[in-house]
Image (cartoon, helix red, strand yellow):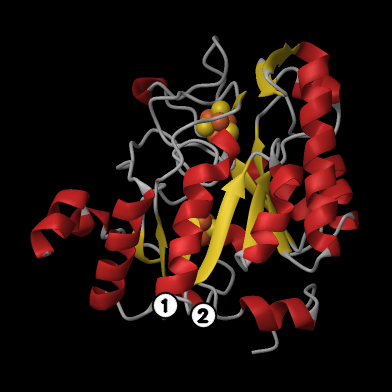
Amino acid sequence: SDGPADMDPAVWEKVKNHPCYSEEAHHYFARMHVAVAPACNIQCNYCNRKYDCSNESRPGVVSEKLTPDQALKKILAVAQEIPQLSVIGIAGPGDSLAAAGKNTFATFEMLQKKAPDLKLCLSTNGLALPDHVDSIAQYNIDHVTITINMVDPEVGAQIYPWIFYKHKRWTGLDAAKILHEQQMLGLEMLTSRGILVKVNSVMIPGINDEHLLEVNKAVKSRGAFLHNIMPLISDPAHGTYFGLNGQRGPTAQELKVVQDACEGGAKLMRHCRQCRADAVGLLGEDRGEEFTADKIEAMG
Ligand code: SF4
Ligand code: SF4
């Protein structure tokens, strides 16, 4: 197919076989996340550190943490069992670029040698992104997802209580301003090198819902090829709620209004499942349980 009307045909050419971007491809190509990045360098008010990062994943689940060696072993075993495996992503359980991205890049380096046909992707909050653009280019990372919830530090200060940057903790407006600047810089650096960038935003009613239109303009004008607006998943039973007062998530209708108002490709991402940080298989299925580290070990 020619792809969606609002997408550059050159971009469509790159993503049409990607299960997350193409409604068609997601029946034929499989993706896998490996949870090799446990640390995080910021605090989001909607995050409970016991669970997976919400940059890309559905919160409230705990993924199996792996070392880079275990991840490689698992990926090679899964590739044997699931021939449609085409994309490997690193999406947590913390931030893929925290702790200097050490485990993330160690995993990608081994994969580049052992399984060069697999496409690689990562997701990040963007704080450390400008420092790692060279490595991202070097390992041929196919695309990067940045979670950007605001372009105004006043809004950001209500979402992020602190960040850890240049060996110290920052809070309030200072923290939100640094995070915002790093996110914009990282986005510009990637798109100017021709690396595909998708932006995720978590819609938080009463905090950034109306503001997301501005975020949409800012990221589109800096070359993001997709802007994926995801609902805050607020579930006190699972310890995932916003801030201290149990902020609710948006209704389906509220989410749709904002998605419709934002330009470009949002339609394409409405099938994003917010997969766990250790999801395995075709989109909409999760065969992660078949491939735990113990079972891989037992396979030999
Ligand atoms: Fe949690 Fe992810 Fe936010 Fe870090 S970036 S605080 S892991 S949701
Ligand atoms: Fe694809 Fe969304 Fe799942 Fe990531 S979280 S693998 S973008 S469907």
Q: Is residue 48 left or right of residue 99?
A: left
Q: x, y (%) of residue 37?
A: 46, 41
Q: Split into 4 quadrants, where in the image is the N terminus?
A: bottom right
Front residue of 246 and 22: 22
Residue 62: image quadrant is: top left
Q: Split into 4 quadrants, where in the image is the C terminus?
A: bottom left
Please tell me which residue is depicted at 74% across the width and 34% down the height of the picture.
209
Per the image, label 2 sits on a secondary structure element best described as: loop
Please tell me which residue is depicted at 22% across the width and 58% down the height of the picture.
291
Is residue 11 visible in the rendered image? The answer is yes
Q: Which amino acid does the dot numbered 2 rest on? A: Glu
**In the rendered image, which residue does mark 2 sit on?**
24
Please tell me which residue is depicted at 58% across the width and 59% down the height of the picture.
270
Q: Is residue 232 left or right of residue 299?
A: right
Q: What is the number of callouts on the image?
A: 2
Q: x, y (%) of residue 77?
A: 25, 68
Per the image, label 1 sits on a secondary structure element best described as: helix
Does the residue at mark 2 contact the one at mark 1 (Cβ under 8 Å)? yes
| Residue 239 numbered tag | none
**In the rendered image, which residue does mark 1 sit on?**
27
Q: x, y (%) of residue 284?
A: 38, 62
Q: x, y (%) of residue 60?
A: 39, 33
Front residue of 15 and 121: 121
Please tell me which residue is depicted at 17% across the width and 59% down the height of the picture.
296
> Which class describes the residues within 10 Å of circle 1: few (<14), some (14-19), or many (20+)?
few
> Which class describes the residues within 10 Å of circle 2: few (<14), some (14-19), or many (20+)?
some
Per the model, the C-alpha gap separating discs 2 and 1 is: 6 Å
Q: Which amino acid does the dot numbered 1 rest on? A: His
242 to 136, vertically: above or below? above
Is residue 160 visible in the rendered image? The answer is no
